[in-house]
Structures are given as structure tokens and as C-alpha cells.
Amino acid sequence: MKIIVTKDNIEGGTKAFEIIKNGMSNGAKVLGLATGSSPISLYSDMCNSDLDFSEMTSINLDEYYGISPENPQSYHYFMQKHLFDQKPFKKSYIPNGLAKNIDEEVENYNQIIQENPIDIQILGIGHNGHIAFNEPGTPFGSLTHKVTLAESTIKANSRFFNNEKEVPRQAICMGIRSIMQGKKIVLLAYGASKQDALKALVEGPVIEKVPASILQDHPDVTIICDQIAAKKINPKYFTI
Ligand code: GLP
């Protein structure tokens, strides 16, 4: 596991962008994409670059269940706004938050992931150690599934909504096993609220109570975090 500590999220975005750029020049064709505030500086670098994504495929980690793609709080909307409007991909997949038949949607999404093996997976991390919406206790062997959000996640994500009541309670989410199948994983984390989750991810036991801890078992993970987020990690783990 590589840990790159940066001054801030802007420098972090630049480092992540370099990884994507190198990956693409080495043949990467499928990007696994994340939402949340952490990847925004990366997406901004991608938008401002001369890279062409029109032959690339993207697969997003998750979507709230029960809100439409036009809803400004949906992850569809987020991706359009921060990346796809400026840099369209050949094909972009995001779970359908309005799917009537959840089992069918889940099956369909697993099929998409199998048919398009992810070359580079971008991840954020929740305060409670979740990756995507895989909350503490999610089996490491999970594939795409419908999840019930943890109270702490609802609270953390309420900052994007008018109030906590508006935050959807459920989501459709790529499972931990699928995330681990990504050939290269880049996890972004900034700010003091990520200190405990990052420490547990890097130094703690690999346990389902801390979903991100499974990344210790992946052969190619880069964590990009700012100095504040990295504060509780023993510096002996740092790469740069
Ligand atoms: C949400 C997303 C996660 C993301 C997390 C952290 O719960 N489903 O994919 O990693 O938020 O978000 P942020 O980067 O805004 O801290």
C-alpha cells in the first residue's frame, strides 16, 4: 500500500490525475468512479486536461435509492456536473436509483462490472470506514446490493441536503468484492474527520467492522490524503 501525503486536496487531485493519466497511456479503458467531496479536485483536473475519455468506460460505485437522476442530490447529477458534461465517456454506468425491480438492477450492475473489468478504481472513505456505501459489517464477499445507510452516514451526507430528513435511507452500491477486483485502487481522503478511518484502514486489523481495512489485502492501492487526515497514521507507513 502506498500512502502519499499532500498539502491539500488540490495537490491530492493532481497526484490522482497523474495516476489516471499514466494508467490511460498504459492502456486503461475502464475507470471506477466515486462521488462525495474528495474526488472533486481530481475531476476538475480531468476536465481541465486535454485527455480524451470518449473511448473510455466509467462505472460508478453507488446511487441513492428512490431519487431521480435529475435530482441535484443524486449521484447521476453530481457526475454530470463535475465530469461528464465536460468530459463525456463512451459509456458511463451508474446504478438506477429509481429501478422498480431491485433484484434485476443489482443483477444487471454485476453483469456490467463483470463485462468491463475496472482498471483504476477511485474511492473515498466514510467517517466510519465505509467504502462506497458499504457500511460497517458488510460482508467482504459482497457484490452489488441494496444498502440501508448507517445513521452516521446520513448525518455526514446531510450537508448536501436541506436537512437530515431529506437524505435517502437506502442506496444501491457496488459490493466490496467487486471493488477489490479493480486492478488499481486510488483512495482519496482529506480533513480531520477522516483521521480515525484512515488510521484503522492502514494500521488496524482487517475486519468487516472497518470495510476499508480490506484494502490492506489488495496488491495495488494508493492512498492520497492531506496532512490533517494523515495525522494519526504512523509516518513509517508514508511513501512520500
Ligand atoms: C458517501 C459516498 C462515498 C464517499 C463518502 C465520503 O457516503 N457514498 O463513496 O466516499 O461519502 O464522502 P466525502 O468525500 O464527501 O467525505
Image: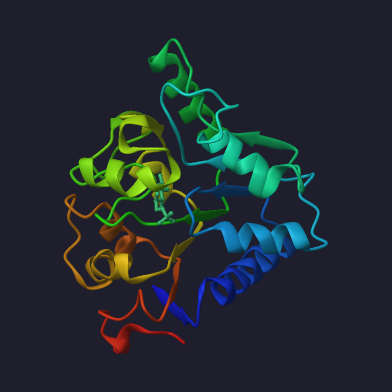
Q: Residue at x 20, y 60 (%)?
A: 206
Which colour assignment does the render follow? Answer: rainbow
Tell me if residue 116 can be seen: no
Q: Residue at x 32, y 65 (%)?
A: 194
Q: On the rendered structure, is 234 left or right of 112?
A: left
186 shown above or below 148: below
Q: Residue at x 40, y 81 (%)?
A: 227
142 shown above or below 3: above
58 shown above or below 111: below
Residue 55 point in image, percent of width and height: 78, 44
Q: Nearer the viewer, residue 20 or 229?
A: 229
Q: Residue furthest top?
A: 100
Residue 37 point in image, percent of width and height: 49, 56
Tell me if residue 230 can be seen: yes
Residue 69 point in image, percent of width and height: 57, 27
Q: Quadrant of the N terminus?
A: bottom left
Q: Residue at x 36, y 57 (%)?
A: 125
Q: Nearer the viewer, residue 208 or 37?
A: 37
Indicate the quadrant where residue 72 lies.
Answer: top right
169 shown above or below 49: above
Q: Nearer the viewer, residue 41 or 121?
A: 41
